[in-house]
Image (cartoon, grey):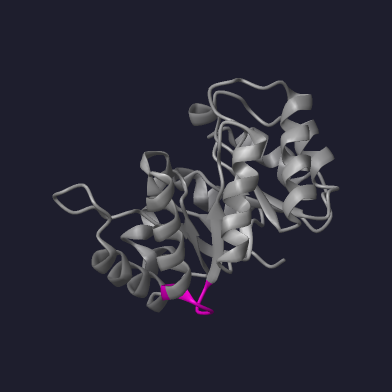
Amino acid sequence: MNIEGVLVPVVTPFDNEGKIDFKALGQLLDFLIESGVRGIVACGTTGEYYTFSDQERHDLMAYIADRVGDRALLIAGVNSTYAGGSIINAEQAKALGYQALMLAPPIYCLPQQHEIVTHYQTLSAAVDMPIIMYNFPARSGVEISVDSVIELSRDKNIVGIKESSGDFSRALALINAGMKDFEVVCGSDDQAADYLFWGVRSWIGGAANYLPKEHV
């Protein structure tokens, strides 16, 4: 799956009553796509997915899918505290027309490496969609080791990793690991130039919400 280009983990606008502001969200999505971004990530960390009720999550996912249509790649963040929760989120995304998933290790429970591997393999087998792993230890509390990434890259559905550790030596280890049909994605905005210099062609950038043209 081609995930090259700028992918935006879209923010979720709220109104003064704490409800999702769909009008503002629609204007933002149009602005991002007109600026040339490659894809939209719904329910990522930047979108504050962890604040939603089940109904809010469904309504947001459905709105983004309908508004974006075939104008950009649709990626769904499907994080949960357990594999079953991620499967539920992924099945919802698949039914709504999303083309890929983004998944971090389960938060708070601090899984060991073999448990992280099983978590991803379980989702892959259950949903059969392209998956971008998300390494953000500052949020999840654990790091997906380089060895685990290499192992998981052999899964036909696992197509890349958003690397947000901030450790560029780790990013270099991943870039130079020679993983087939697998992309390392820049997830550290302050290191984007370094990633691009070393041949990375995909960037999931939070600041692209307000500087999309500059990112592209």
Q: Residue 107 at x, y = what percent? A: 55, 28
> Residue 143 appears at what percent x and percent y?
63, 28
Q: Is residue 210 above or below residue 140?
A: below
Residue 176: x %, y % from top left: 77, 45
Residue extending furthest left? 16
The residue located at (46%, 60%) in the rendering is: 61
Q: Residue at x 21, y 47 (%)?
A: 18
Q: Quadrant of the N terminus?
A: bottom right
Left or right side of 126 for 66: left
Q: Could you tell me if residue 14 is visible in this image?
A: yes
Where residue 132 sits: x, y (%)?
A: 65, 51
Instruction: Specify the quadrant of the image occupied by residue 148.
Output: top right
Q: Nearer the viewer, residue 199 or 115?
A: 115
Q: Give 55 or 101, whichever is nearer the viewer.
A: 55
Q: Does residue 201 appear anywhere in the picture?
A: no
**Could you tell me which residue is drawn at 46 percent across and 53 percent down?**
205
Q: Is residue 195 magenta?
A: no
**Magenta part of the chain:** 67-72
Decide: is 110 above or below 137. Answer: above
**Residue at x 50% of width, y 43% of height:** 188
119 horizontally vs 211: left or right: right
Q: Is residue 71 magenta?
A: yes
Q: Main secondary structure of the magenta part?
A: loop
How many numbered markers are drawn? 0
